[in-house]
Image (spheres, grey):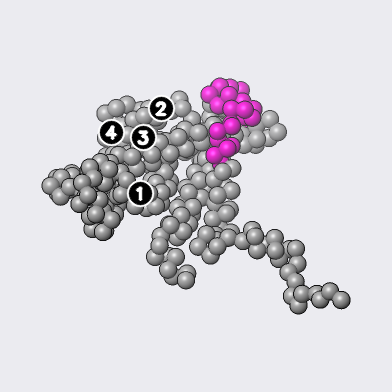
Amino acid sequence: MIEQPQSRHSAFQVLTGLLSLPAGARVGIGPMLAALTLVTIVLASILAPLYVPYDPLAMNSAARLKPPSEEFLLGTDPYGRDTFSRVMVGGRVSLLIGVGAALVSVAIGLAIGLVAGFFRMADSIIMRIMDSLMAIPAILLAIALVALNGPSVTSVIIAITVPEVPRVVRLVRSVVLTAREEPYVEAAIALGSSMPKVLLQHLMPNTFAPLIVQGTYICASAILIEAILSFLGAGVSTEIPTWGNIMAEGRSYFQIKPGLIFWPGLMLSLCILAINLLGDTARDILDPRMKKREV
């Protein structure tokens, strides 16, 4: 007779074992929902011109402040423009500003932070400049920069980037100050490696994990600041639909038609919440101290 094994795993147990993630890479239901929400918002905004029923800039005086209906899914604004079309298309500009400000801030902050952390003579000068920029309130500095450059997407990205760069510089500098004392860095310097090679090949990779986390926070902050600037009338031109501009135009009619502020505000809140949750998850996964706690 052929002996049967004493313990046999079912096909379901084998499948779940293969699909299960290691302990350090497991995430809860919250981050998964946040990722799904963010992907949905991004795709809906990018593909908006393909499915929105009306031109978000087309005015119709005969359809002013219409309630939600089959013709106008979320109603219309004071100028007869379809609210649904404007909210969906407006997300493209808001997300563009958020991602653009995050990428530019991280790129500039990384370059300056590497120099400040490695070269002691440049450190004191650079950090005093960064401290001076951080002493100015970010909103006031952004309003001043937009007023100087004029209302446009580029000027808003610059206005949001300038206050964020010092935070990235301080983060990169702290990582470089710790990493440059490591034996492998000292060995590379002793072997005659050039400074660019030491900075780019040995020190810069240590900054990637914290920069990914910082980049998510900058992106969420940039989207929020853009909405604040647009709401105050100091952001993107009012001709370009953004979540902030839509809320700014609807504030005078909030009592009779709260949906003009509710729907773009809801999209803005969900987007920022999703990005922050994903940033917290990335920090927990990439931070080695969090991994040690799980062991």
Q: Earlier in the sequence, mark 1 or mark 3?
A: 3
Which numbered disc flags the more N-terminal residue, 1 or 2? 1
Residue type (three-letter) at the residue carrying disc 3: Ile
Kind of residue sitting beneath label 4? Leu
Q: Which mark is residue 237?
A: 2
C-alpha gap between disc 1 and disc 3: 26 Å
Q: Is there a contact, CB below 8 Å, between mark 1 and mark 2?
A: no
Q: Position of residue 253 (x, y in %)?
A: 51, 37
Image x and y of residue 238, in percent: 43, 28
Circle 1 Cα neighbour tier, 10 Å, few/some/many (<14 / 14–19 / ≥20) = few
Task: Write down the residue under mark 3.
Answer: 157
Q: Amino acid at mark 1?
A: Pro
Q: Nearer the viewer, residue 66 or 126?
A: 126
Sooner in the amino-acid sequence: mark 2 or mark 3: 3
On-image quarter of the N terminus:
bottom right
Give the structural element (helix, strand or loop) at label 1: helix
Q: Name the amino acid type tagged 2.
A: Ser
C-alpha span from label 4 to label 2: 15 Å
Nearer to the camera, 25 or 169: 25
Residue at 59%, 27% in the rendered image: 49
Q: Residues within 10 Å of mark 3 (few under 14, many from 20)?
A: many
Task: Provide the residue span drawn in magenta.
Answer: 41-67
Q: Is residue 61 left or right of residue 214?
A: right
Nearer-the-camera pick, 90 or 206: 206
Mark 2–mark 3 distance (CA, rounded to whole Å) = 13 Å
Circle nearer the N terminus (3, 4): 4
> Distance of mark 1 from mark 2, alpha carbons?
39 Å
Q: Which residue is mark 4?
A: 145
**Which is in the foreground here, disc 4 or disc 1?**
1
Marks counted in the figure total 4
Please give left or right for residue 229 compared with residue 131 in the image.
right
